[in-house]
Image: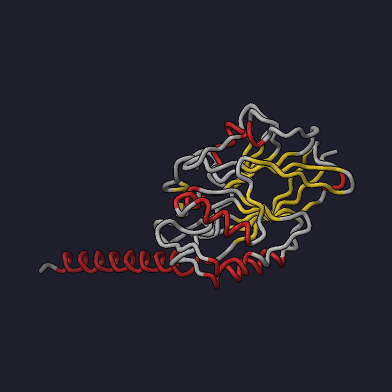
Amino acid sequence: MEPERITRRKFMLKGMGFFAALAAFTGGYAFFGERYWIQTKQVSLSFPKLPKTFSGMRMVQFSDVHLGKHYSNHRLEKLVAEIMELKPDLICFTGDLFDTHDGDPNDSIIPLLAKLNAPLGKFAALGNHDHAKGKSRIVDILTRSGLRVLDNEQSILEKQGERIRIVGVDDMFMGKPNLNKALQEEFAPSFTLLLSHAPDYADQASHFPIDLQISGHSHGGQVRLPFIGAITTPKFGRKYIQGLHKVKDSQLLVYTNRGIGTTNLPVRLFCRPEITVFTLLREV
């Protein structure tokens, strides 16, 4: 064989070896590293309708735990401890407690979730995986854990004579979200927070007196590539994929949390799991 061909072949083999090593490293990092590397995001938002007594409120959102083979009770226990270290005034969970593929809804997580406490309460909305695993069973587990499940209904929070409203709707994918039903009870104009598992529901919610919608579902894409973004996203999680957005032709803000767990493939790449800490302020 000619020396030039031998050199070229060695170069190609070295190149193939490099890319194979890079792929192995990336896969290992996505499986063993990033999917457990939770990011705590701090988000400050101002609203003219927020009562003065609620200004400065710290609201912690977590979403898409997907308990199962790839996210254990031990991980959940650590997550709860991490949330409590943030000293929340209000806690909101935006759906998908167990994973459809390998999660087993069981009472063992109730004492873990029961450790979540906040002065203004803890609330939950349902996701598509909650429906798939049995809606009534998941509602029972969440309720016995002390979370108030808002299924097309609202809850009024009062502090020193002033009030805000928290509304939750059913899942957009497998349920029947109904804001008309949720808002039937009279409520004086004030700040309204919406919990919707599906972020793309914001386009419908923008026609109602909602100030902020918080969601999950998309996992931020779970795998993102530089300059490209999310490789794939689920139905109803394709428009507001991650982070803060303002709905066109409205004043509604929607924030999409990247979630805690994973589904389909137990990997995350350039898309860390997320706990969101909102500081809500009165705009003056």
Give coordinates of residue 140: x percent, y percent. 57, 57
Query: Nearest the camera: 255 or 76?
Result: 76
Residue reaching furthest to the right: 160
Q: Nearer the viewer, residue 284 or 114?
A: 114
Furthest residue in direction bottom, as rendered: 74
Residue 227 in the figure: left or right of residue 14 = right
Near-viewer residue (117 or 43):
117
Is 94 placed above or below 68 here?
Answer: above
Residue located at (59% from left, 50% from top): 94
Whole-percent x and y of residue 30?
A: 44, 64
Residue 48 found in image quarter: top right
Evaluate whether residue 272 shows in this view: no
* Residue at (53% x, 52% y) in the render: 136
Query: Which residue is found at the position 55% from the left and 69% from the top?
Result: 108
**Displayed quadrant of residue 193:** top right
Tell me, yes or no, if residue 46 can be seen here. Answer: yes
Task: Determine the residue positioned at 60% across, 44% down.
Answer: 151
